[in-house]
Image (cartoon, rainbow, N blue to C red):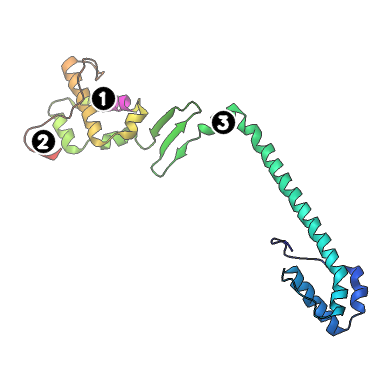
């Protein structure tokens, strides 16, 4: 018997053989059959059992051969079906491109988009304008108010966030200190050059140093 074959058949037309056996002989025969199909290679206990078993053994061999042929055919059919389903996708450039662009989201909602040309865009859906504002702690904000108008600060927060968000890589890597540097640059340029674009005038991004308690708490 094959390793994966868990059953076998006895046929109705074998009844004539069983009818010629008494109960003791029939019991020996069925035990011999069970040992045979479990690959125990049994030896018949007597001539009657050996004689009665021979036609049954030949039928078991025919059944096994037929079962193995069908299993092989099913295996080939399964492989052909899988190839038929996946081969069109493997050669369809549009499908490959769409699959490559599918977003992969992890627990912090970071999205990575890739296409077949190898370009990768990283964006963080949690880093909104509100997130940017929360990175500007109260001590830093108070120090800003000492040197800038409130309306300028509000507008600078929006503009500097928009500038950062325009570069998804930069936004994804941004930490509180990065937000403070950018906001300080923006406000410094507004005050120095009188324009809303925080980088007209070539002011570098730096965190300001404050006197007194501020510098020790930033």
Question: Residue 140: x, y in percent?
Answer: 17, 34
In the picture, the quarter occupied by the N terminus is bottom right
Q: Quadrant of residue 108?
A: top left
Q: Main secondary structure of the magenta part?
A: helix
Between the residue at mark 3 and the residue at mark 2, the CA separation in whole angstroms equals: 54 Å
Badge 2 marks a residue whose secondary structure is: helix
Depth check, front residue: 189 or 67: 67
- Looking at the rendered structure, which numbered label has been put on residue 96? 3
- Which residue is the site of mark 2? 215
Q: Nearer the viewer, residue 50 or 215?
A: 50
Q: Nearer the viewer, residue 203 or 138?
A: 203
Q: Which mark is residue 87?
A: none
Residue at 86% in and 79% down? 47
Nearest to viewer (mark 1 / mark 3): 3
**Left or right: 102 with respect to 121?**
right
Q: Position of residue 42 (x, y in %)?
A: 75, 74
Q: Earlier in the sequence, mark 2 or mark 1?
A: 1
Which numbered mark, 2 or 1, is in the foreground of this view?
A: 2
Residue topped by disc 1: 155
Residue sitting at 44 percent across and 27 percent down?
A: 119
Q: Specify whether 198 is left or right of 107.
A: left
Which corner quadrant of the image does residue 174 belong to? top left
Crowding at mark 3 (Cα within 10 Å: few <14, some 14-19, many 20+): some
Q: Residue at x 24, y 32 (%)?
A: 178
Inter-mark Cα distance, 2 to 1: 24 Å
From which residue to which does the magenta span run? Answer: 157-164
Q: Quadrant of the C terminus?
A: top left
Cα distance in 3D space between marks 1 and 3: 43 Å
Q: Are marks 3 and 2 in contact (CB under 8 Å)?
A: no
């Amino acid at each position: 018997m094959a390793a994966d074959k868990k059953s076998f058949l006895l046929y109705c037309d074998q009844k004539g053989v069983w009818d010629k056996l008494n109960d003791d002989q029939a019991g020996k025969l069925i035990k011999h059959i069970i040992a045979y199909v479990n690959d125990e290679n049994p030896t018949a206990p007597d001539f009657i059992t050996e004689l009665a078993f021979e036609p049954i053994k030949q039928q078991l061999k025919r059944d096994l051969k037929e079962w193995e042929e069908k299993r092989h055919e099913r295996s080939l059919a399964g492989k052909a079906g899988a190839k038929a389903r996946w081969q069109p996708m493997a050669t369809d450039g549009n499908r490959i491109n769409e699959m490559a662009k599918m977003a992969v989201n992890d627990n912090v909602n970071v999205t990575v988009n890739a296409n077949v040309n190898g370009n990768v865009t990283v964006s963080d859906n949690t880093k909104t304008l509100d997130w940017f504002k929360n990175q500007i702690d109260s001590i830093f904000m108070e120090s800003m108010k000492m040197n800038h108008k409130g309306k300028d600060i509000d507008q600078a927060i929006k503009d500097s966030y928009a500038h950062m968000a325009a570069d998804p890589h930069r936004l994804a890597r941004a930490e509180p200190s990065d937000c403070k540097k950018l906001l300080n640059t923006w406000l410094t340029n507004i005050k120095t050059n009188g324009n809303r674009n925080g980088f007209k005038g070539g002011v570098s991004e730096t965190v300001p140093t404050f006197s007194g308690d501020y510098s020790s708490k930033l």
